[in-house]
Image (spheres, grey):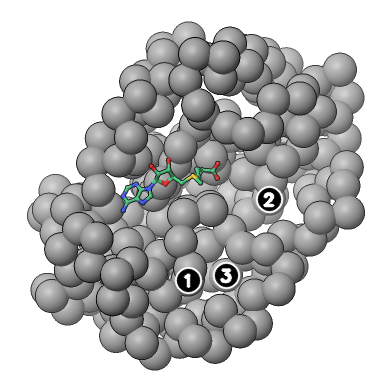
Amino acid sequence: MTKEILKDGFNKLNLSYDSIKNEKFEKYKNLLKEWNQKINITAINDDEEIYIKHFLDSVIILDKNMENEKKRIIDIGTGGGFPGVPLKISNSNYEVTLLDSLKKRIDFLSIVIKELDLKDMHLIHGRAEDFGQDKNYREEYDICVSRAVAQLNVLSELCIPFVKVGGYFAAYKSENIAEEINSSKSAIAKLGGKITEVKEIKLPGSDIVRKIVIIEKIKNTDKIYPRKAGKPSKDPLI
Ligand code: SAM
């Protein structure tokens, strides 16, 4: 069954699909279901929903041109590995770092990386606010991705500091995003970013419309950002 839903979905997104990807997605789905019984990883537990709402939704930012490129990607608030792990399965050339503040989710992801035999993957257990100020991670990534973590103004302070000038942050958002975008524009500018595109894509196999906000890094982020852990959500930038 994986093969049909994912293969059709990849086709609709104009992305290639093969038996290696299929095997890795299948193993990942089984691990998610197994570990979800022990620790809370995701509210989604049904096979079809995992394929559509986790796997296809994660790869929705990709297009044919991106399939073989080499990029350094960081996924902030990755949870059970979304969108970072499906992006890595889709393009083995990517170097992907997964960051989350919940240790048990990072422990789960270390099992996923081992079982799926994924190379060039890194795990960080900690707060985005702390690692965004660490010179080993700050402005080191071509692409930052994040899904279901915070409102766009808060999320931008967590994510934009990781992106190199010339790279971009892709925020996975839902259909009604206009107001959130408007109230985030000045925060994004303060962080050195600029919204260059809002992609609208229908999630294959569903009626869900996904909006991806692309924020280009146009200048270095001021040293004062991100502020101390907890501050971005308590006192969002305006
Ligand atoms: N991105 C995943 C997805 O779409 O399924 C997980 C979303 S989950 C609702 C939000 C995740 O963000 C949680 O795992 C939480 O621990 C993490 N998180 C929230 N704030 C964070 C922060 N400041 N630094 C690191 N992780 C954070």
Q: What type is the residue that disc 3 sits on? A: Val
Residue 225 occupies quadrant: bottom left
Looking at the image, tell me whether mark 3 or mark 1 is earlier in sequence order: 1
In contact (CB < 8 Å): disc 3 and disc 1:
yes
Residue at image x 30%, y 40%?
A: 101
Q: Is residue 164 left or right of residue 169?
A: left
- The residue at which mark 2 appears reads as 60
- The residue at which mark 3 appears reads as 213
Query: Which one is in front, 90 or 188?
Result: 188
Q: CA distance from mark 2 to mark 3?
A: 12 Å
Q: CA distance from mark 2 to mark 1?
A: 19 Å
Looking at the image, tell me whether mark 2 or mark 3 is earlier in sequence order: 2
Front disc: 2 or 1: 1
- The residue at which mark 1 appears reads as 152
User: How packed is label 1: few (under 14 Cα within 10 Å), some, or many (20 or more)?
Assistant: many
SS for tag 3?
A: strand
- Image coordinates for residue 140, horizontal then vertical, percent: 25, 55
Residue at image x 49%, y 34%?
A: 81
Most extreme residue toward the front, as rendered?
234
Q: What type is the residue that disc 1 sits on? A: Leu
Q: Is residue 172 above or below residue 119?
A: below
Q: Is residue 119 left or right of residue 8?
A: left
Looking at the rendering, in which quadrant would you find the C terminus? bottom left
Q: CA distance from mark 3 to mark 1?
A: 9 Å
Residue at image x 88%, y 24%?
A: 4
Q: Is residue 88 above or below residue 164?
A: above
Q: What type is the residue that disc 2 sits on? A: Ile
SS for tag 1?
A: helix
Q: Is residue 94 visible?
A: no
Q: Is residue 223 above or below residue 7?
A: below
- Image coordinates for residue 129, horizontal then vertical, percent: 22, 57
